Image (cartoon, rainbow, N blue to C red):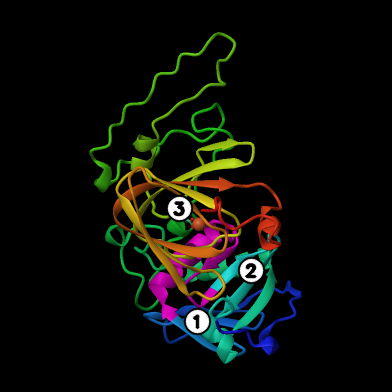
Amino acid sequence: MTTANPTTTPTLTTNATDHSARLDERYGYQVFSIGSYTFQRDEYFVRVSYPRGTYVADVGAFLRAMMRDVAWGFFYGWVNFDDVFGTVNHYGSVDVFVGAYNAGYKAAGTDFTERFDANKLLACFRALLSDWTNAGYDPFAAPLETGSPYGSKNGNNDEAVNFQRELAERFVGLPGDSELRTDARGFPVNRQFADVEQDEPEVHCEPGFEGELAAFSLFAYLSRSPVTWNPSIVSVVGESAYCPTSEEHILPILHGNDRVEWFLQLTDEITWQIADKNTAAPRAIVTMKAGDVCAMPADISHRGYSPKRSMLLVWENMTPGLEQRYASGELAPTAAEF
Ligand code: PHB
Ligand code: FE
């Protein structure tokens, strides 16, 4: 195994300065700077300059990843945009890294990490996402259901980039909580779920329990999800959250979890690419078919490939401080030892 170059280990203090932006006349997009990073895009690519080099990536893939990072408030643990660039959530502060979890970059000494105040970084990423997303392109949509991310600046699509996922506080359908998805609320059945039955269960509760009992068809609910790879929350019991989602094409991030996370494949299939969280070395390819359940370990990154729109239940343990218990080794990275 390659060992890290000790001179590349950063001493991290939190940078809480605002970002700045200036116009790039060539393409009409803003160039964003925060700390020692500068982000600029052209018709096809993003370039991120950092003190030890330049990272370049397809701008469509970058915007799809950025959309999730922003909408999920930096999510749990690592949001890798690819094997090189990404963020690590420290819940209040966030690291932006290039190559810091890639054995090749570490060996070459071209890795870099800078820590930011979470709100300052979020403001920068939000502004970038809004400016770089053109009219007709929705970074949350499946590629077959949206326009192109490419070309020079052409309007914007703030309605899409401000899409709010539905986060039930207790359970979908309880009074005051997330509502069922219906045509009237602007959630038509997706083209690939036209065969999903739409009946809802009848709820008859004992007197005295009115308003405390709810039931709904999760399949009907998910058949009406307008976006992909964007878990909503449908139930919360203690620190346990059911986060189902509809998936099509590629999960735009490689999620490096800071805890064990359960997947239940509800329909169709997803192939998962699993890699070592620290080096990006490939570890496994797992295909989950309808009915399969798995517990993703806490020491890997995972990226899903869904050839057809599918339904996935992601089950998250939101117990505060869990990330430290895994990081310190108190908890084993896998849910079971074989
Ligand atoms: C995950 O990283 O576990 C994840 C994220 C979004 C999804 C599914 C899974 O839609
Ligand atoms: Fe995950």
Residue 44: horizontal and vertical position, in percent? 37, 80
| Residue at mark 2 to residue at mark 1: CA–CA distance | 16 Å
| Residue interval drawn in magenta | 57-85
Task: Report helix, strand or loop for mark 1.
Answer: strand
Does residue 55 appear in this view? yes
**Residue pointed to by mark 3:** 230
Of discs 3 and 1, which sits in the foreground? 3
84 or 153: nearer the eye?
84
Does residue 49 appear in this view? no
Circle 2: is it few (<14), some (14-19), or many (20+) Cα within 10 Å?
many
**Residue pointed to by mark 2:** 121
Q: Residue at x 36, y 70 (%)?
A: 149
Q: Earlier in the sequence, mark 3 or mark 1?
A: 1
**Residue pointed to by mark 1:** 40
Q: Earlier in the sequence, mark 2 or mark 1?
A: 1
Question: Hey, which residue is sitting farthest top in the picture?
Answer: 207
| Residue at mark 3 to residue at mark 1: CA–CA distance | 26 Å
Task: Report helix, strand or loop for mark 3.
Answer: loop
